[in-house]
Image (cartoon, rainbow, N blue to C red):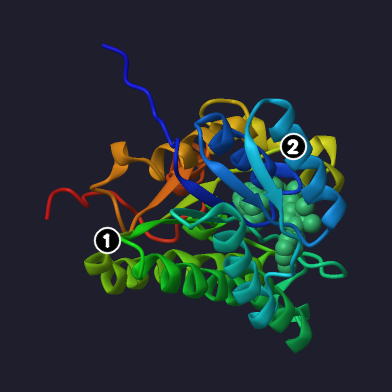
Amino acid sequence: MTIAIDHTGRNALVTGAGAGIGREIARWLARAGAAVAVNDLLSGRAEAVVAEIIDEGGRAVALPADCRDDEAVDALVDATVDQLGGLDLAVNNVGMLPPGRRPRPFVEYGGDDWRDIVEQNLVQAALCGRAEAAVMAGAGGGSILFVTSGETTRPAAYNAAYAAAKAAVNHLVTTMAVELGPEEIRVNAIAPGTTLTETVAAAFTEERMAALVAATPLRRMVEHDELARLAVFLCSDLARCITGQFLLADAGAFLSRSRPANNEGLTVSLKGAHAR
Ligand SMILES: NC(=O)c1ccc[n+]([C@@H]2O[C@H](COP(=O)([O-])OP(=O)(O)OC[C@H]3O[C@@H](n4cnc5c(N)ncnc54)[C@H](O)[C@@H]3O)[C@@H](O)[C@H]2O)c1
């Protein structure tokens, strides 16, 4: 028996799909048969991904918009419905630091840093989820997937605002799942570990990447297409009993950092802890 995932006849929207992880998710949803609305802030990027999908025999339309803008998001979801014929699957992938913001020590984050980073990673996700859910609720349900981060599962030194905003999205997923479950809308997230997108390649030195790989149980980073295939799965009927979850996809990086191999750095002795 072969088990295949078939999204034929479904209409999908992927935000921030002009590059990196979102581009790969859009391409894999199209390969699985979905018609895809490719959103990006930059229209040239969205159009290039649409051309790639069409070259592979898929169906896609470019819908550039800034997902931080309430009205633009509502118009984006309306245009998806108008141009594709409906909305069954939505992947809210926009995130990272907005232009001009950079990681910094917690005490150096100003109010504008917090507002910009929370808007880019939490507010826009909520705006997209709201508009998508409103359409799906009136049309028999669907699947909404957010892309959060492995940074939500452990302290994220120098990345406080980004990690806190992404952790809030993981929590939003649980609330949306409870409210929207009766409408047959599933809401989940994937939380990627470090993935070598162009943005990450530009931000990390080779030494930092090597240190990350060395500290990861699988001794490698996560590949774009691995995340895309997870998205295709979580949006599919094979995952139809899963809602309100975030799935950490980080090659095991969380394990190595959360459980030190010895007592180094602990301020209390663990001796006798099991005797009590
Ligand atoms: N790359 C990683 O290591 C990594 C790790 C964990 C989580 N993530 C998350 O994965 C998602 C994708 O990351 P990536 O590395 O592929 O990013 P990326 O920077 O490579 O691509 C993001 C795309 O989104 C577009 N975009 C940015 N702001 C937008 C907006 N407001 N509205 C519409 N489009 C917008 C950009 O133009 C770009 O094409 C993000 O949510 C990020 O936080 C990435």
Q: Nearer the viewer, residue 166 or 186?
A: 186
Q: Is residue 138 above or below residue 40?
A: below
The residue drawn where x is 74% and y is 88% is: 111
Q: Nearer the viewer, residue 236 or 81?
A: 81
Residue 197 in percent (x, y) is at 75, 41
Question: Counting other residues with Cα less than 10 Å from the Cα at mark 1, is it few (<14), some (14-19), or many (20 or more)?
Answer: some
Report the number of numbered marks: 2
> Which quarter of the rendered image does ligand 1 occupy?
bottom right
On the rendered structure, is 57 left or right of 197?
left
Q: Is mark 1 within 8 Å of ligand 1?
A: no
Amino acid found under the numbered disc labelled 1: Glu
Tell me where residue 4 sits by quadrant. top left
The residue drawn where x is 64% and y is 81% is: 70
Q: Nearer the viewer, residue 33 or 229?
A: 33
Tell me where residue 139 sits by quadrant. bottom left
| Outermost residue to the left | 276
Residue on which the image places disc 1:
184
Residue 3 in percent (x, y) is at 32, 20
Residue 262 in percent (x, y) is at 44, 40
Q: Is residue 70 above or below residue 35?
A: below
Is residue 151 visible to us here? Answer: yes
Is residue 222 visible to us here? Answer: no
SS state under label 1: loop
SS state under label 2: helix
Spatial CA span between label 1 and label 2: 41 Å
Amino acid found under the numbered disc labelled 2: Met
The residue drawn where x is 26% and y is 11% is: 1
Question: Counting other residues with Cα less than 10 Å from the Cα at mark 2, is it few (<14), some (14-19), or many (20 or more)?
Answer: some
Res 105 label: none
In this rendering, which labeled residue sits more in front, label 1 or label 2? 1
The residue drawn where x is 28% and y is 49% is: 242
Residue on which the image places disc 2:
209
